[in-house]
Image: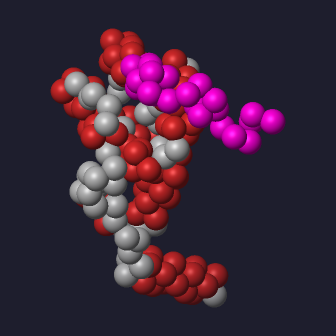
Amino acid sequence: MKSNKLQYIGGGILVVLILIQFIVPAHNLSNDNTNNISNKYPVSAEVQQILKTSCNDCHSNLTVYPWYSKIQPVAWWLQHHVDEGKEKLNYSEFLTYAPHRQFHKMEETIEMLGEHEMPLGSYTWIHGDAKLSTAQENLLKDWAGSVMDSLKANYPPDSLINPKKRR
């Protein structure tokens, strides 16, 4: 009797796993670079390569999806990470941000790199080439600092502070 119950439960789980394969999240595959950070701020070829390898899958509008992204529920988990990453910082939409937000995002970039919080361990575990060397981290921090310097040179200081924090 007990083995029949286990068979029904196992069969039910198998049916659910098969059915969820048909619920596919939308992929992040826009290659619209109209508002890309590189349209206003210099991005060297070396920085561009680091961004492509270590950042853009979650922080741009063009994700390169691995083969396992076609398997549910893994695809949902991956898409959640991509959506969350783009919400926090999206290099493809960077020029739509207000100057204070652009400035703050570069501050956060420097901070996250300094604390080795990016790229995420769950990403580098599978994408070993995305791990950043100290030299690459420093290059990205210097680049983010140069974007901040450009913002300082082109906008009044009070426009680089979040209006909600000025009070």
Q: Quadrant of the C terminus?
A: top right
Residue ID at (22%, 25%): 44
Residue ID at (58%, 31%): 160
Residue 101 position, x and y percent, is 55, 39
Q: Is residue 101 visible?
A: yes
Query: Magenta includes 44?
Result: no
Residue 100 position, x and y percent, is 57, 36
Q: Is residue 41 above or below residue 101?
A: above
State the residue in front, 15 or 49: 49
Query: Magenta includes 155?
Result: yes
Q: Is residue 66 visible?
A: no
Coloring scheme used: secondary structure
Residue ID at (27%, 40%): 39
Residue 61 position, x and y percent, is 34, 54
Horizontal side of 11 relative to 3 (left or right) equals left
Q: Is residue 100 above or below residue 131?
A: below
Residue ID at (42%, 83%): 19
Horizontal side of 33 relative to 121 (left or right) equals left
State the residue in front, 28 or 18: 28
User: Can you name the residue that lies furthest to the left here?
Assistant: 45
State the residue in front, 26 or 2: 26
Residue 132 appears in which quarter of the rendering? top left
Q: Quadrant of the N terminus?
A: bottom right
Residue 105 position, x and y percent, is 52, 35
State the residue in front, 115 or 129: 115
Magenta span dominant secondary structure? helix
Q: Is residue 82 above or below residue 14?
A: above
Stretch in magenta? 145-167
Image mark count: 0
User: Can you name the residue that lies furthest to the right here?
Assistant: 167
